[in-house]
Image: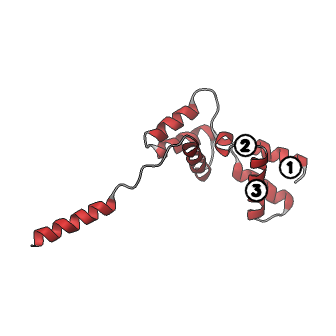
């Protein structure tokens, strides 16, 4: 990639438009999707850009902290919605960015709701009642 294209890609990444950056690389170079994606990822790494930080809202009003607080309270969908409203990112980009933010802040997703244990409990109850 030439310097002009790299600068354009950096600008797109700084606005959270990762998919658009990959599209531009493909348009300008003729590379396939995997090659363009790899080039953009290498540019992110080379610039030491943390993708979560590059995509995170940063208007100085605590938006990132609000997203982190939602994630800490197990409200991932609301965090994604807030992220999308603040950045105008697509659903997939927002989901990935919110997951990166969660990982960066050590926030783990809650485990499953325990459906298997409910099924096992129902089977045991049915077996017990049938005796």
Q: Is residue 87 left or right of residue 109?
A: right
User: On residue 49, which mark appears?
Assistant: 2
**In percent of the image, x 78 and y 50: which residue is there?**
43
Residue in front for this viewpoint, 86 or 65: 65
Nearest to N terminus: mark 1 or mark 3? 1
* Label 3 SS: helix
User: On residue 115, which mark appears?
Assistant: none
**In percent of the image, x 75 and y 43: which residue is there?**
48
**Residue named by callout 3:** 23
Q: In which quadrant will I find the C terminus?
A: bottom left
Residue at the far bottom: name it: 131
Residue in front for this viewpoint, 106 or 26: 106
Assess disc 2: are there few (<14), some (14-19) or many (≥20) residues with their C-alpha within 10 Å of its C-alpha: some
Find residue 53 and report its horizontal and vertical position in percent.
Answer: 66, 39
The relative height of residue 40 versus residue 60 in the rendered view (above or below) is: below
Residue in front for this viewpoint, 10 or 106: 106
Nearest to N terminus: mark 2 or mark 1? 1
């Amino acid at each position: 990639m030439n310097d002009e294209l790299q600068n354009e890609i950096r600008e797109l990444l700084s606005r959270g438009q990762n998919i658009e950056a990959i599209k531009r690389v493909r348009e300008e170079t003729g590379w396939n999707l995997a090659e363009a994606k790899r080039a953009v990822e290498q540019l992110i790494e080379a610039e030491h850009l943390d993708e979560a930080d590059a995509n995170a809202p940063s208007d100085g009003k605590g938006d990132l902290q609000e997203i982190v607080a939602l994630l800490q309270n197990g409200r991932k969908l609301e965090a994604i919605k807030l992220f999308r409203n603040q950045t105008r990112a697509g659903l997939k980009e927002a989901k990935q960015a919110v997951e990166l933010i969660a990982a960066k802040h050590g926030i783990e997703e809650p485990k499953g709701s325990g459906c298997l244990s409910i099924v096992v409990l129902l089977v045991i109850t049915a077996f017990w009642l049938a005796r």
